[in-house]
Image (cartoon, grey):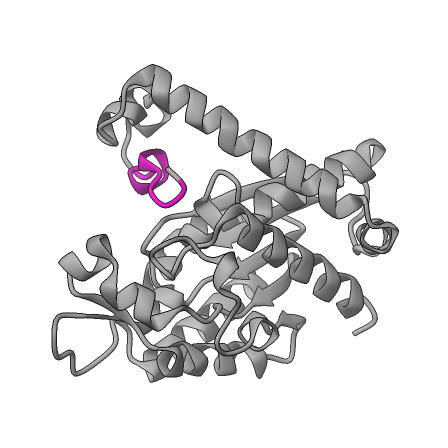
Amino acid sequence: MKVLQPEHTVASLPGAAALTEPMRAALLGLAPDVYSAELGRLRAGAKEAARELLADPAVGAMVDRLPLRPGARVLAFGDSHTSDPQSWAVILSEMLAARRPADGISVDVSAVAGETTTHGLIRIGGVIARNPDWILFFIGVNDARTQGPAPSKTLVAPEETARNLAELRKRVSRETKAQCLWVTPPPVLEDRVSKHWGLSRFGVCFLNEDIARVAQVIAAFDAPAIELFARLGLPPPQDLFMEDGLHFTLEGQKRIALEVVRGWADARAR
């Protein structure tokens, strides 16, 4: 449930809005009561993570400094790192609700597990139509994914990733007044990814050298960017990751939320 969300995967279908909790549970092979209880647990975890972060006065001060006017609409755009029910974006939303309740700031999520920047070009039109004040981009790690025992290329070639990201930037600048914050894809635990029972079954692999190429493109933007790849370091802390070495635990999502808040608050003066 942290990795796959059927309602996001089929969001473009006409009947997606009518996908009830029991239907989502069935698509994941879970009993409705199990699904509902687990979803509640995940959401409660995100709320608690926000509370723990705000217990640090310095973090609260950073949230106060975020360049968000009352009533601002924030859109978090990404893949499974963002679609997670207890993702950094959900934690950020909880932090803003707790720290700045009178400001009425909304944080919505537009994220689909497994998507690349090429998929992002398809979905960005829907995001633009929602007229956000800020778009927080956290996408690109799946561009660096490879498939099979001896792959000769990543899913999206580095040059195409750069073109896709440039096109996303152009569309936002031409069609909206939204400001953008970019987050580089994070590193992974390569050994865990390659040996994971689920990922290895489909020949999924990630190399940090491939992810680094995507991160370098984003870090070079003349726009506020949070260099998460660099901030987590190589190798990244193991306790931030789930058993697959790719997706983040609640503690990992909490760390990302902190880095986003810190980087965003500091970027205000740019």
Quarter occupied by residue 181: bottom right
Instruction: Please name the residue shown 65% across and 42% down the image.
Output: 49
Q: Nearer the viewer, residue 107 or 213?
A: 213
Q: Is residue 192 visible?
A: yes
Residue 131 drawn at (x, y percent) = 60, 46
Residue at 64% over, 47% down = 74
Q: Is residue 77 above or below residue 73?
A: below
Q: Position of residue 3 (x, y in %)?
A: 36, 45
Of 55 and 61, the residue lying toward us: 55
In the figure, is residue 219 to the left or right of 39? right
On screen, residue 82 versus residue 29, left or right, reads: right
Residue furthest front as drawn: 239
Residue 42 in the image: state x and y as whole percent.
50, 33
| Magenta extent | 2-12
Seen in the picture, residue 84 relative to 145 is either above or below; the reply is above
In this image, 33 relative to 197: left or right?
A: right
* Quarter of the image that includes the C terminus: bottom right
